[in-house]
Amino acid sequence: MRALKDYTLAEWLAIAPAIHRLRRGRNVMVDRLYRGRPAPGQGELVARLQGLDAPALAFTIAFNLPPAIALLADGMARFLPDTPLVVCDNSSRPEARAAIAALCAERGLAYCALPPPPLKGGGNGSRSHAVALNWVLHNLIRPAAPKVFALLDHDLVPLAPVELTALVADQPAYGMV
């Protein structure tokens, strides 16, 4: 959120700071309400993740593209075989959710059908992705408490071996904020 001193006179006259703060308040409320929604099998999944002896866990938010999840899973299996992939499905189309769930079951990937998006119809795609990421952080990552975790876009396919733990060995985070 921008500091109040960073708004121009024209923005002040158009009451932009007030509008931006109202939108921010709405987004925070939507995020907190969504975070509280349970997902089917959530407790069992957290227990499964806690029981894994892996150097890192990778999480991805799936959205209506089973082929992207298949490519990501192939890349992970080839180049990060010791890093389990957790597919968190935020798809809006039931047929995509079914295909992604089937793909995960077939390949032995951890799967979580996220609760329905908080703003049906009028939602913003970026906001939907953001609340899904926050849901995963609060409901899967924090309770499972992996030593290292990665949040990967569903279309980010590894093309070479990488050691996630090495990327954060001397720093708390890696990547773009």
Image (spheres, rainbow, N blue to C red):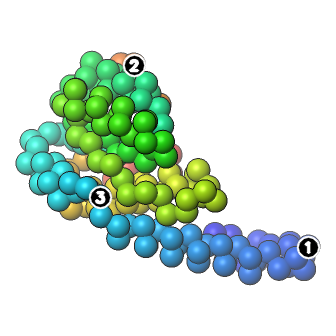
Q: In which quarter of the image is residue 134?
A: bottom left
Q: Left or right of 15: which side holds 33? A: left
The residue lying at 30 percent from left, 37 percent from top is: 101
Q: What SS does tag 2 mark? A: loop
155, above or below 2, in the image: above
Label 3 crowd (10 A; few <14 / some 14-19 / many >=20): some
Residue 40 at x, y percent in the picture: 25, 56
Residue 104 at x, y percent in the picture: 27, 33
Amino acid beneath label 1: Ala
Question: Of callouts 1 and 3, which one flags the residue occurring earlier in the amino acid sequence?
Answer: 1
> Label 3 to label 2, Cα distance in Å?
32 Å
109, above or below 136, in the image: above
- Residue 58 circle label: none
Residue toward you, 94 or 6: 94
Q: What SS does tag 1 mark? A: helix
The residue lying at 34 percent from left, 46 percent from top is: 88
Residue assigned mark 3: 39
Label 2 crowd (10 A; few <14 / some 14-19 / many >=20): few
Amino acid beneath label 3: Ala
Nearer to us of marks 1 and 3 is 3
Amino acid beneath label 2: Leu
The residue lying at 17 percent from left, 59 percent from top is: 43
Q: How many marks do you count on the picture?
A: 3
> Label 1 to label 2, Cα distance in Å?
48 Å
The residue lying at 30 percent from left, 28 percent from top is: 103
Q: Left or right of 8: which side holds 151? A: left
Q: What SS does tag 3 mark? A: loop
Residue 69 at x, y percent in the picture: 39, 30
Residue assigned mark 1: 10
Answer whether residue 168 is visible to the viewer in this image. Answer: no
Which residue is the extreme one toward the front? 95
